[in-house]
Amino acid sequence: MHAEKIIEPEQSQEQEPNWLSKLGPGLIAGAADDDPSGIATYSQAGAQFGFGMLWTLVITYPLMVGIQIVSARIGRVTGHGLATNIRRHYPAWLLYPIVGLLLLANTINIAADVAAMGDAMKLVAGGPAQLYAVGFGLVSVLLQVFIPYTRYVSVLKWLTLALLAYVATVFVVHIPWERVAKEAVTLPALPWKPAFITTIVAVFGTTISPYLFFWQASQEVEELRADDSAHPLKKAPREARAGFNRIRLDTYIGMGFSNLVAFFIMLTTAVTLHLHGMTEIETSAQAATALRPIAGDFAFMLFALGIIGTGMLAIPVLAGSAAYAIAGAFKWKNSLEHEPQMAPKFYGIIVVATLAGVGLVFAPIDPIKALYWSAVINGVISIPIMAVMMLMASRVDVMGRLVIARRLKVIGWMCTAVMAAAVTAMLVTNLA
């Protein structure tokens, strides 16, 4: 038997669902990647370096697609999330630090996101930013705990439309498209300054994030549980072609949406803030405020409301991915389809991670430094996670005859190597 060869199952005679119904885990993962802290990173890149950073998002797209497809396939083929699979096939000393650091990084990220949402709401409506932050955190917890998965995932799908605010913003400012097309595919001349390298690392770390791996794999498992006629592909290889085609479509569109929005955020801040000499942006709310006198009230309002909408999408993904990881590591029941009393520890992690993030808003901690260290943690743990994912996806004892093919292996390992190089560059640059 050749492990490299994927089964080509027979086509189902049943009517194929429309392409919109095939979107879910990949679309939500991609949209959640553009959270308020990610918006801040892309705004910083555009404000500080103008069009000189656009090329990074052209490179990250195929890498992001490849590694997310690998994570989704692991969940769909095995019927288990990443943490459960790592626990089954790798030693505890590898698993526990990864899920512990993921929980820490996600909690800090939640804190940064709810703080940004509170600041954005204050810009739009006035009032106390911290009170808004608490409200957003509580609403997110209540939605996750008390709405079943099949209904909640529909809410998350609709929330992805919040990202269209950043698409609309581009059309209310003047864009020199010819220059953009040229610089988006052109690497800046060497040598690169340390600040430029650090920003590249920040963009890569924001775009390719560990919590997205755990989320998409676990959501594939949730999709299985929600459909009585579906089975893990390892046990039902005849369903593989339809399953893999859906994952591919879902991930290509989700990650494309994510990178396109990130591109537009960077582009908007480049043609407004950077060209007007405003290069020091630290938060997404600050970027929205800076846009107002340059691009007008409409652009400001779109940018600010987008922060709130994307935060409501990202917080459950951050808390949920941490809960899936911890529950999988300790063999706890884990599903958003379960009632809270059926999976109390799983829901407990969601509640603790979200409320701890809200609590950090009131702590005497510099949110920018906290977010920086969250990015460092994410960057460091992403390397072993991706390496383990690639190894698992190539193992017959994990994937059966549905191991990943050579093309996906090349893209996945390339993504792992690029992240390793980025983290190494970040560490060397900061130590120097």
Image (cartoon, rainbow, N blue to C red):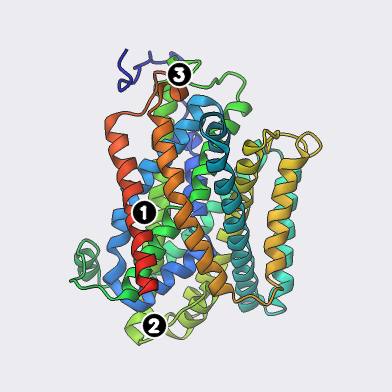
Q: Amino acid at mark 3?
A: Glu
Q: Which mark is residue 279?
A: 2
Q: Is residue 399 left or right of residue 326?
A: left
* Circle 2: element type: loop
Question: Measuring 52% from the left and 46% from the top, which residue is drawn there?
Answer: 28
Residue position marked by numbered label 1 in the rendering:
419
Q: Nearer the viewer, mark 2 or mark 1?
A: 1
Q: Amino acid at mark 1?
A: Met
For label 2, the crowd category at 10 Å Cα-Cα, with few meaning under 14, some 14 to 19 and many 20 or more, is: some
Asked if residue 332 shows in the view, the reply is yes
Q: Amino acid at mark 2?
A: Thr
Question: Measuring 71% from the left and 73% from the top, which residue is drawn there?
Answer: 362
Q: Which mark is residue 239?
A: 3
Question: Measuring 45% from the left and 31% from the top, which residue is drawn there?
Answer: 73
- Of all residues, the one furthest to the right in this rendering is 341
Place of residue 295 in the rendered image (x, y in percent of width and height, measured from the top left): 42, 80
In 3D space, how far apart are the residues under numbered discs 2 and 3 (Cα atoms)?
Answer: 52 Å
Classify residue 173 by image quadrant: bottom left
Mark with earlier residue (1, 3): 3
For label 3, the crowd category at 10 Å Cα-Cα, with few meaning under 14, some 14 to 19 and many 20 or more, is: many
Q: Nearer the viewer, mark 1 or mark 3?
A: 1
Asked if residue 174 shows in the view, the reply is no
